[in-house]
Image (tube, rainbow, N blue to C red):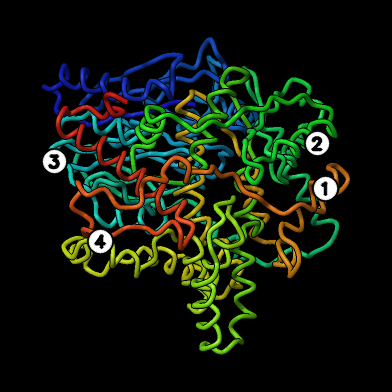
């Protein structure tokens, strides 16, 4: 697990380029505190920060293979042992025990087709002088990030946006992408290939890119897409399918225990992380379990985590979740680089910070909800089918009555918040309702909040378009499968995996997600709807697989999610930050009329981010706020 960066440059600029590469690497020391390597040859600069996980004594990067190809790689190839044996049978010889050397040999043997053989999480860059190109690639689901910039000097890339901001050529003419800001206000994150800056893009999950060093052509290619699995014939719904699901999950956990450093598990007490813990088997004896503990009862799940640990015979470390000081929150926003306001960044940061004292690798339960329809939004989609039979006039009256009478409780994703959100979205078409369930500021609120100039500059842009395109990709699938595919292409890579990567790597901790093993993802895409959810249950196949391994109280308890009482942090933020010029004068939230937790946190984080941006414009350095 590491940080990578690089760029092309004119040969006469080699000394300046070496200095700039050093600045890029220095900005990402947290991603790789165990070492640093550089490569500058023929107008190509590659840099690497190393967090040593496998083969601690060798395997340093950049690494050059027999063909002259040079690799910088962030992530883990979990099936590297199996690939190594296959490559050795073809004549490859290895000098290290690292997965890095296996990845490089796989590229030299199979070229771009090697991507389909990899089981892991990765973002990498290869300078291939024989073919006169640089190859960039990202894993199937987007677990590891990769940003890039195209300009007159060629291509530049980095694991984090702050690495690119260290380059003078990227800083010149840097502008905020207003469509990205619109995404953020609607959803709390930025969608797809956009970044918060218009000149910087993200390589999308399951994509690769090639940059031709002679002519400067930059070509994008999607090498993996879950749509094929969703559209494949459905598997039978029987006990053999349940057994195969459990087999795949256990193998995914087993592969992710491969490490030369201590391993732990984030155990929330929910079904997903408890299932990962139950799959540890005999190897679990050396695994540390860590859970978060909150003062507020509606947020705390540590009692359930302790129950699971006792049932499976493990020890457990509980980590208290205090409200972060202003300086710590500023550092979180700096690590994120872009506006991002999922409240779970706070406990994920705090538990990662504590976990780093016990382990360097952590397994988590992320991804199960996206595979198996585990969110309350999926239940809302189903309930909407019944509500659609109600007259619109009646539905409108109920909504107006609820808005007038229901007052916010400010509990964790409270019934009052869910009720009002459901009633507001239920009158919309099914696709738009699925999008609406997750919105923070809806279209009407954004119109009343944003300045006319900002709105005009969007030229009608709507964040919903990304969702609509994903729905269109599965035209003949069930609405449930369409919704899961949409989540897999929006919420999962742009929210969940961003949070997991930045908050763990900000503490030099590697976070692995067994549920996102691509074999398990493709298997779940082929499951019939009844294996995922029905009118009274969700994640059905997982619950059946875990029946004999976990207490019934864990299997049957409702999902609570991993959130933080963020209104306690941002309760004073009831108006947008005025200094941006993006917002109308006089717009304010009403915390007595509705639960404004997510809205106020959204505005609070944006205010911090914009202050970091303004400081950057003044100093040229992307840093946490001075004086906090």
Residue carrying label 2: 307
* Residue 525 location (% of width, % of height): 63, 59
Which is nearer the N-term, disc 1 or disc 4? 4
Cα distance, mark 2 to mark 4? Answer: 48 Å
Tell me whether circle 1 and circle 4 mark residues in contact (CB < 8 Å). Answer: no
- SS class, disc 1: helix
Q: Is residue 546 visible?
A: yes
Q: Nearer the viewer, residue 575 or 348?
A: 575
Cα distance, mark 2 to mark 3? Answer: 59 Å
Q: Nearer the viewer, residue 123 or 415?
A: 415
Res. 152 mark: 3
Does residue 568 appear left or right of residue 358 in this picture? left
Which is nearer the N-term, disc 3 or disc 4? 3
* Residue 491 location (% of width, % of height): 49, 54
Residue carrying label 1: 553
Q: Is residue 62 visible?
A: no
For residue 123, what is the image quadrant? top left
Q: Reply above or below: 89 against 94.
A: below
- SS class, disc 2: helix
Query: Mark 3 against mark 4, which lies toward the viewer?
Result: 4
- SS class, disc 3: loop
* Residue 170 location (% of width, % of height): 19, 36
Residue carrying label 4: 450
Which is nearer the N-term, disc 3 or disc 1? 3
Task: Please tell me which residue is depicted at 55% across the width and 65% down the height of the picture.
Answer: 483
Tell me whether circle 2 and circle 1 mark residues in contact (CB < 8 Å). Answer: yes
Cα distance, mark 2 to mark 1? Answer: 9 Å
Q: Nearer the viewer, residue 147 or 598?
A: 598
């Amino acid at each position: 697990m590491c940080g990578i960066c690089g760029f092309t440059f004119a040969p006469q600029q080699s000394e300046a380029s070496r200095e700039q590469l050093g600045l890029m690497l220095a900005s990402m020391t947290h991603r790789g505190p165990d070492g640093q390597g550089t490569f500058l040859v023929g107008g190509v600069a590659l840099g690497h920060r190393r967090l040593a996980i496998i083969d601690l004594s060798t395997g340093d990067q950049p690494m050059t293979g027999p063909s002259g190809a040079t690799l910088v790689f962030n992530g883990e190839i979990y099936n590297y042992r199996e690939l190594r044996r296959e490559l050795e049978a073809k004549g490859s010889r290895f000098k290290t025990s690292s997965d890095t050397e296996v990845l490089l040999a796989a590229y030299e043997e199979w070229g771009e087709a090697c991507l389909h053989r990899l089981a892991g999480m990765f973002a990498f860059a290869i300078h291939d002088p024989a073919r006169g190109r640089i190859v960039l690639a990202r894993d199937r689901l987007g677990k590891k990030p990769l940003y890039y910039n195209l300009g007159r000097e060629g291509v530049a890339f980095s694991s984090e946006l702050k690495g690119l901001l260290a380059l003078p050529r990227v800083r010149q003419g840097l502008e905020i992408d207003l469509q990205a800001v619109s995404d953020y206000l609607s959803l709390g994150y930025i969608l797809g290939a956009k970044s918060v800056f218009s000149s910087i893009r993200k390589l999308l999950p399951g994509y690769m890119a090639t940059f031709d060093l002679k002519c400067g052509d930059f070509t994008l290619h999607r090498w993996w897409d879950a749509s094929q699995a969703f559209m494949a014939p459905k598997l039978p719904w029987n006990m053999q399918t349940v057994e195969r699901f459990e087999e795949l999950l256990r193998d995914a956990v087993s592969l992710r225990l491969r490490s030369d450093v201590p391993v732990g598990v984030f155990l929330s007490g929910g079904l997903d992380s408890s299932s990962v813990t139950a799959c540890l088997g005999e190897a679990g004896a050396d695994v540390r379990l860590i859970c978060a503990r909150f003062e507020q009862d509606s947020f705390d799940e540590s009692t359930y985590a302790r129950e699971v640990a006792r049932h499976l015979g493990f020890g457990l470390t509980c980590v208290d979740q205090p409200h972060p000081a202003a300086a710590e929150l500023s550092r979180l926003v700096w690590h994120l680089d872009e506006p991002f306001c999922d409240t779970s960044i706070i406990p994920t940061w705090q538990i990662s910070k504590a976990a780093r004292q016990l382990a360097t690798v952590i397994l988590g339960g992320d991804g199960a909800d996206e595979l198996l329809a585990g969110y309350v939004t999926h239940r809302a989609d189903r309930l909407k089918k019944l509500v659609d039979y109600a007259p619109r006039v009646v539905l409108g009256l109920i909504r107006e009555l609820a808005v007038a009478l229901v007052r916010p409780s400010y509990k964790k994703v409270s019934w009052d918040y869910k009720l009002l959100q459901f009633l507001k979205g239920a009158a919309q078409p099914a696709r738009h309702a699925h999008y609406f369930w997750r919105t923070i500021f809806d279209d009407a609120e954004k119109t009343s909040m944003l300045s006319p100039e900002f709105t005009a500059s969007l030229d009608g842009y709507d964040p919903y378009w990304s969702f609509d395109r994903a729905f269109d990709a599965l035209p003949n699938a069930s609405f449930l499968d369409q919704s899961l595919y949409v989540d897999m292409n929006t919420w999962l890579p742009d929210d969940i995996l961003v949070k997991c990567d930045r908050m763990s790597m900000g503490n030099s901790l590697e976070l692995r997600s067994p549920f996102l093993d691509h074999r398990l993802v493709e298997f779940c895409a082929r499951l019939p709807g009844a294996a995922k959810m029905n009118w009274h249950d969700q994640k059905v196949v997982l619950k059946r697989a875990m029946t004999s391994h976990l207490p019934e109280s864990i299997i049957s308890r409702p999902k609570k999610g991993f959130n933080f009482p963020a209104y306690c942090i941002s309760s004073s933020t009831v108006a947008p930050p005025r200094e941006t010029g993006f917002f109308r004068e006089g717009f304010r939230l009403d915390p007595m009329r509705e639960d404004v937790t997510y809205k106020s946190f959204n505005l609070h984080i944006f205010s911090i981010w914009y202050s970091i941006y303004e400081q950057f414009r003044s100093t040229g350095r992307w840093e946490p706020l001075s004086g906090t």
